[in-house]
Image (cartoon, helix red, strand yellow):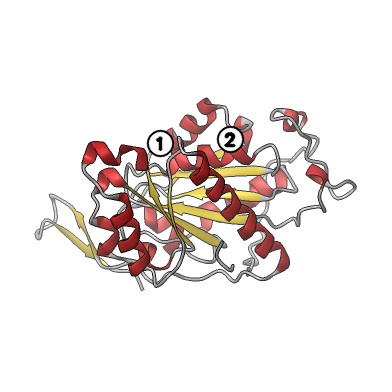
Amino acid sequence: MPDHTPDPAHPHDHAHPHDHAHPHAQAHGHAHPHADAPPHGHAPAPTRSLRLGVAGPVGTGKSSLIALVCRELAHELALGVITNDIYTDEDARFLRSAGVLDPERIRAVETGACPHTAIRDDVTANLLAVEDLEEDFAPLDVVLVESGGDNLTATFSPALVDAQIFVLDVAGGGDVARKGGPGIGRADLLVVNKTDLAPYVGVDVTRMVADATAARDGRPVLALSRHDAASVEALKDWVRVMLAAHRAGAHVPQDPGPMAPHFHADEEHPAGGILHTHA
């Protein structure tokens, strides 16, 4: 496994009370007590969870990957999820309907703007959602933050997440991994997803993983299928290793770098849209 935070001082006033009794915390088979007793048979988790971002283009399987992590690890870790969509909570509803976590542990942020704005430029809405979730279900081990579906430029601010997974899928084309970009090149883990579909879309997974590894200067790449037990176990192990490094203070969140300039189409704009850049 790879070798593997600053918590922004972001106090905010909760206008609503938080009842920490949470009887529904038993829903997936274990309680989440506070500091008076260690959860899950290990030392108490810090109040500050590992915040794990999941980004990638539309349709690569980000929600399904999060559902897989929750289904596989909820029995040993206390988890929460924040999803991002522009005008809907559809991803959150998908995860709730999948039954992978207590529904109250899955919350939606409706960004109202291009999805990467809320995970990089102004992370306030997401940061508040994460902090509320951590307070309501303390102590949490991991909070997964799903970016709204975007393109190869999307990256999280290190002010929001401690580590990032960038997701590609074989159906997007075998050449996409070598096209690069900050997420492909510098996310903590690159997942090449849906490898079981490769024979049906004419993609050589071995070549795609080799291209991705070259683009990442040796940073970890995982070829994943939810139907392949070995790859699922490798994903679980990566999350465990990252969590251990976070707890030990051995992992420093990295900024993958600014997103590349990209075009926002707008029929009413004289040029047909706006070329958008991020500092």
Q: Which residue is mark 1?
A: 88
Does residue 153 appear in the picture of this structure?
Answer: no
What mark, if any, has residue 71 been given in the picture?
A: 2
Identify the residue at horizontal 32%, vertical 41% (top origin): 59
Question: Of helix, strand and loop, which one carries label 2?
Answer: helix
Q: Is residue 274 above or below residue 66?
A: below
In the displayed structure, does residue 13 sit left or right of residue 100? right
Identify the residue at horizontal 61%, vertical 59% (top origin): 242
Identify the residue at horizontal 38%, vertical 56% (top origin): 116
Amino acid type of the residue that numbered disc 2 sits on in the rendered structure = Arg
Amino acid type of the residue that numbered disc 1 sits on in the rendered structure = Thr
- The numbered mark, 2 or 1, whose residue comes first in the sequence reads 2
Inter-mark Cα distance, 2 to 1? 24 Å
| Residue 60 place in picture, x, y as percent | 35, 44
| Residue 119 place in picture, x, y as percent | 45, 57
> Would you call the spot at circle 2 few (<14 residues within 10 Å), some (14-19), or many (20 or more)?
some
Where is residue 107, by image quadrant? top right
| Residue 270 place in picture, x, y as percent | 9, 59
Q: From this viewpoint, which residue is outermost toward the right?
A: 36
Question: Of helix, strand and loop, which one carries label 1?
Answer: loop
Identify the residue at horizontal 60%, vertical 52% (top origin): 237
Q: Are marks 2 and 1 in contact (CB under 8 Å)?
A: no
Q: Is residue 122 above or below residue 203?
A: below
